[in-house]
Amino acid sequence: MSPLTSIHQLWSSIPSTGLGPADKSAPSATSIPAAELRQLDAGHDPMSATGTPSAQSSFSSVLGQMVQDVNAKQGVATQALQDLQSGQNTSLHQTMIAMEEASVSFQLMVEVRNRLLDSYQEIMRMQV
């Protein structure tokens, strides 16, 4: 039995409470072909462009990647500022944007670190 079939059976067994399939005012659900679902799943990248980590990546690797990203943004901002100061063809707007991106990403990293430390301290205060 496929997971979709078991979900459908479970959904069909819910009594009419306005939430189940017996509610006639709700629009009917259409089924998605299994081939289309497999195609969507095949295109799923564990570390997508949004930066969400996969279940297989470790917590330390996620934090390490975050620090590397912040460092890279700091480097880009520093290079843009040096290019602007040396008179190269660099826009003031692009330099300021790079500096703000670096600043915001650093602030985010500091806040994550603070939350992690607070969580660790809270766990250490727990009585066993």
Image (cartoon, rainbow, N blue to C red):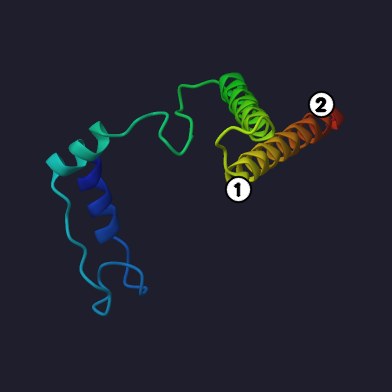
Tell me the quarter of the picture where residue 107 sits.
Answer: top right
For disc 1, the marked residue is: 93
Identity of the residue drawn at 32% across and 72% down: 16
**Three-letter residue code for mark 1:** His
Could you say which is closer to the camera, residue 39 or residue 18?
39
Q: Is 96 placed above or below 116 here?
A: below
Q: How many labels does the image show?
A: 2
For disc 2, the marked residue is: 128
Q: Which residue lies furthest to the front in this view?
A: 87
Q: Identify the secondary structure beneath mark 1.
A: helix
Asked whether the beta carbons under mark 2 and mark 1 sit within 8 Å of each other, the answer is no
Q: Quadrant of the C terminus?
A: top right
Q: Name the side, left or right, on which 123 lies relative to 25.
A: right
Residue 63: x, y in percent? 62, 25
Could you say which is closer to the camera, residue 35 or residue 25?
35
Residue 19: x, y in percent? 36, 69
Q: Is 106 placed above or below 100 here?
A: above
Which one is in front in this view, the residue at disc 2 or the one at disc 1? 1
Residue 4: x, y in percent? 23, 46
